[in-house]
C-alpha cells in the first residue's frame, strides 16, 4: 500500500494531528526549508527527495497551494492524490476529487481535514478568468463579485457613472443580470475644463455608446444616459443597490456622490474608484467635501486594487436618507447571509 505524506511541518501540519490524523499513519513530511531531518518522529524530505512513486496521498498544509500544485506537477504526483487542507483558494474543487483520501483515511476524517473557510469568500467566476480578461485587476473584479453576491435581497438598480469603454460595466452587467444598469458617460471625455491634460482627455474620447452596448452580456438591461452628468440625468429617479463612481475629477465625483448616495438603498455599495490614486487627488477631495456638507464621516473600506478603490456601504440603521422618495421602509431587516453551517 502506498504511503501518506504531509507537505509542511508548521501550524497547518499540527492542525492535522489535532483534527485526528495520528502521526503513526504519516510516512513522511515534505518541507522546502526543513528545520531538522524528523518531525513528530517521521522523516522530513525536501520536495525533490520525496519518494513520489510511493505517494498514495499528499496532504498539503501550507498556504502556497498554487506553488505546491505546480511543484507536484513537476514531481509527477497525480492531482487526484493531493488533498489541499489549508487555504485552498481556487483549488478546493481539486481536493473534492481526491478519491485516495477517503480510501486511506476514511471519509469522516477527510471531511474534518478539508478546509471550511474561503469557500464563501473566493470569487467563483472571476477568480478563474485569465489576467488579461480582468484588466490585470483581480482585486477590483474579485471584490465586485463578492459584493454582488451580498446584494441578494437588497432592492435597486445598478449604475456606473464613468463608463468609458465598458470595461467594468460589463462585469456589473454579467454579475447582476436581472438588475437594470444605468450607464452615464459623455462618451466624449471629461467635463470641459475639468481635465488638465489634453492627451488624457483625448484618450477618453475614444469610445461610443454603441461600442459599450456590444461588450455587455445583457444589453437589454442597460439604460444609457449619454452627456455630462448631472445634466444627463434629465429628471431620472430610481434607487440603487450598487453604484460604480469612476469619473476621475473632483467636480464630477462630487456631483455623483450628491446624487447617488441618498438614492443608495441600505446594504448597497458605492465603489469610489481612484480614491487612493495619487494621480487623481480630486476623487478623495470630493469625498471630503461631501462629508463636510453632510456633517458626517462615511465609513469606507479601502481596496488594495490597482487604482485604490474605496468601498462605501449604506448602513441599515439610522440612515436619514432611506426615504428620499419613498419605497424603502426605515429599519429594513439585514439581508440573510450564508452561515458557516451551510458549508459542505
Ligand atoms: C476612467 S474612465 C471610466 C472607466 C470605467 N469605469 C472602467 O473601469 O472601465 C472615466 C470616464 O468618465 C467620463 N466622465 C468624466 N466626467 C464625466 C461627467 N461629468 N459626465 C459624464 N461622463 C464623465 C469620461 O468621459 C470617461 O469615459
Image: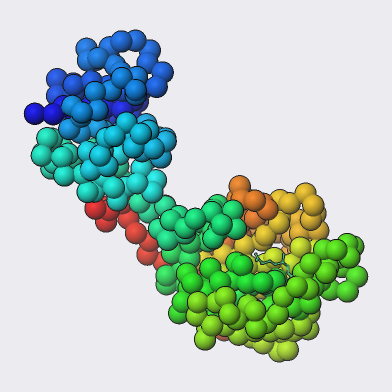
**Residue 100, horizontal then vertical, whole percent:** 15, 40
Query: From the viewer's perspective, is 333 left or right of 75?
Result: right
- Where is residue 339? Give x, y as percent: 32, 55
Which part of the image, by quadrant, shows the N terminus?
Answer: top left
Between 118 and 266, the one nearer to me in the picture? 118
* Residue at 70% over, 71% down: 164
The residue closer to the viewer here, 90 or 47, is 47
Foreground residue, 267 or 81?
81
Image: 209 above or below 128: below
Q: Residue furthest bottom?
A: 235
The quarter holding residue 252 reads: bottom right
Residue depicted at x 73% and y 51%: 277
Evaluate whether residue 19 shows in this view: no
The image shows residue 116 at horizontal and vertical percentages of 30, 45
Q: Can residue 226 be seen in the rendering of this structure?
A: yes
Using the image, determine if residue 318 lies above or below residue 34: below
- x 65%, y 51%: residue: 306
The colour scheme is rainbow
Rendered location of residue 274, percent (x, y) = 71, 56
Q: Residue at x 61, y 50 (%)?
A: 305
- Residue 161 is left or right of residue 113, and the answer is right
Count of all numbered marks drawn on residues in the image: 0
Q: Determine whether 189 is above or below 294 in the image.
A: below
In terms of image quarters, where does ligand 1 lie? bottom right
Amino acid at each position: 500500500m502506498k504511503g501518506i505524506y504531509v507537505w509542511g511541518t508548521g501550524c497547518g501540519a499540527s492542525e492535522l494531528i489535532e483534527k485526528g490524523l495520528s502521526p503513526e499513519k504519516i510516512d513522511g513530511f515534505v518541507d522546502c526549508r526543513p528545520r531538522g531531518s524528523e518531525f513528530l518522529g517521521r522523516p522530513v524530505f525536501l520536495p525533490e527527495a520525496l519518494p513520489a512513486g510511493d505517494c498514495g496521498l499528499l496532504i498539503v498544509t501550507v498556504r502556497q497551494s498554487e506553488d505546491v500544485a505546480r511543484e507536484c506537477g513537476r514531481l509527477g504526483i497525480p492531482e487526484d492524490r493531493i488533498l489541499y487542507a489549508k487555504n485552498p483558494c481556487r483549488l478546493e474543487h481539486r481536493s473534492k476529487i481526491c478519491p485516495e483520501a477517503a480510501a486511506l483515511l476514511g471519509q469522516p476524517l477527510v471531511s474534518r481535514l478539508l478546509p471550511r473557510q474561503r469557500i464563501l469568500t473566493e470569487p467563483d467566476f472571476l477568480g478563474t478568468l485569465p489576467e488579461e480578461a480582468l484588466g490585470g485587476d483581480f482585486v477590483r473584479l474579485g471584490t465586485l463579485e463578492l459584493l454582488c453576491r451580498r446584494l441578494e435581497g437588497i432592492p435597486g438598480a445598478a449604475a456606473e457613472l464613468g463608463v468609458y469603454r465598458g470595461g467594468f460595466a460589463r462585469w456589473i452587467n454579467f454579475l447582476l443580470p436581472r438588475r437594470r444598469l444605468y450607464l452615464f458617460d459623455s462618451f466624449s471625455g471629461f467635463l470641459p475644463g475639468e481635465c488638465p491634460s489634453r492627451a488624457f482627455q483625448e484618450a477618453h474620447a475614444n469610445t461610443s455608446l454603441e461600442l459599450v452596448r456590444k461588450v455587455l452580456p445583457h444589453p437589454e438591461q442597460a439604460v444609457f444616459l449619454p452627456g455630462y452628468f448631472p445634466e444627463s440625468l434629465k429628471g431620472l429617479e430610481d434607487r440603487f443597490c450598487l453604484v460604480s463612481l469612476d469619473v476621475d475629477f473632483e467636480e464630477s465625483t462630487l456631483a455623483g456622490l450628491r446624487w447617488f448616495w441618498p438614492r443608495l438603498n441600505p446594504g448597497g455599495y458605492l465603489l469610489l474608484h481612484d480614491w487612493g490614486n495619487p494621480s487623481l487627488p480630486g476623487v478623495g477631495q470630493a469625498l471630503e467635501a461631501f462629508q463636510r456638507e453632510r456633517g458626517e464621516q462615511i465609513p469606507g473600506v479601502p481596496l488594495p486594487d490597482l487604482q485604490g478603490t474605496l468601498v462605501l456601504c449604506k448602513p441599515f440603521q439610522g440612515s436619514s436618507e432611506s426615504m428620499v422618495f419613498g419605497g424603502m421602509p426605515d429599519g429594513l431587516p439585514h439581508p440573510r447571509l450564508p452561515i458557516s453551517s451551510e458549508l459542505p
